[in-house]
Amino acid sequence: MNLYIIRHAIAVDEYEEDSQRPLSDKGKKKMRQIAKGLRILGVDFDLILSSPYVRAKETAEILMEVFKIKQDVQFSENLVPMGDPDLLISEMNEKYNATSIALVGHEPFLSALVGLLISENTNVDLSFKKGGVCRLSADDLHHTRQATLEWLLTPGVLVEIAEK
């Protein structure tokens, strides 16, 4: 199984309710380039699972568009900024049968999730920039939560790949 952990793109700074903050125009444009960079690298998804927050939802929709994925984005309350990684892993095991999953969410949750999966420690210090992508591989998340960190790419690197 491949897991692509993706932080939402750049959102507007000020908004009445945090969960409703949309992506900025710059964030939308950059996310399209990031998605193109991922395609050039040969990334593919069976499923996109996203936080229901607007900025994550819009990021997931851009991925769906660029990758021409026909299946609708699925949403999980377990991907919100203060979500519980254990609950997300249980949800994925119970509800989804996919070999390549994009998880779109927020910090500090994503770093905690990666830490739990690679070292069983939620306090791993990772730098997930907005639009950053991490690839993990795992044989199975049912019996063990050990995954291998394959790569962690910044948005700048993915944009550069897309522009070549």
Image: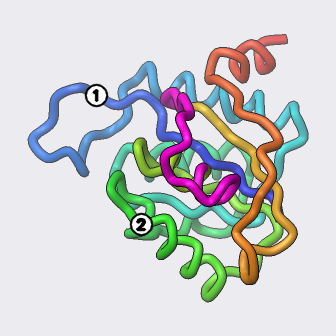
Chain-order first, disc 1 or disc 2: 1
Which colour style is shown?
Answer: rainbow
* Camera-side residue of 161 and 145: 145
Question: Residue most toward the bottom?
Answer: 94
Residue at 85% from the left image edge and 11% from the top image edge? 164
Q: Give the image quarter of residue 12.
A: top left
The residue lying toward the viewer, choosing from 60 and 125, is 125
Image position of 10 with respect to 84: above or below: above
Q: Quadrant of residue 37?
A: top right
In the displayed structure, does residue 2 sit left or right of residue 59?
right
Residue shown at the point (53%, 69%) measured from the top left: 74
Chief SS of the magenta region: loop
Residue at the (64%, 15%) spot, across then down: 156
Residue highlighted by disc 1:
12
Residue 51's place in the image compared with 30, above or below, is below
Residue type, label 1 = Val
Q: Which mark is residue 84?
A: 2
The mark closer to the camera, 1 or 2, is 2
Between 104 and 59, which is closer to the camera in this rendering? 104
Mark 2 surroundings within 10 Å by alpha-carbon count, few (fewer than 14), some (14 through 19), many (20 or more): some
Question: Which residues are the magenta region?
Answer: 115-131
Quadrant containing the N terminus is: bottom right
Q: Position of residue 105 (x, y in %)?
A: 47, 50
| Residue 52 place in picture, x, y as percent | 38, 61
Identify the amino acid type marked 2. Answer: Asp
Residue 120 falls within the magenta-colored stretch: yes
Question: Horizontally, is 19 left or right of 29 in the view?
Answer: left
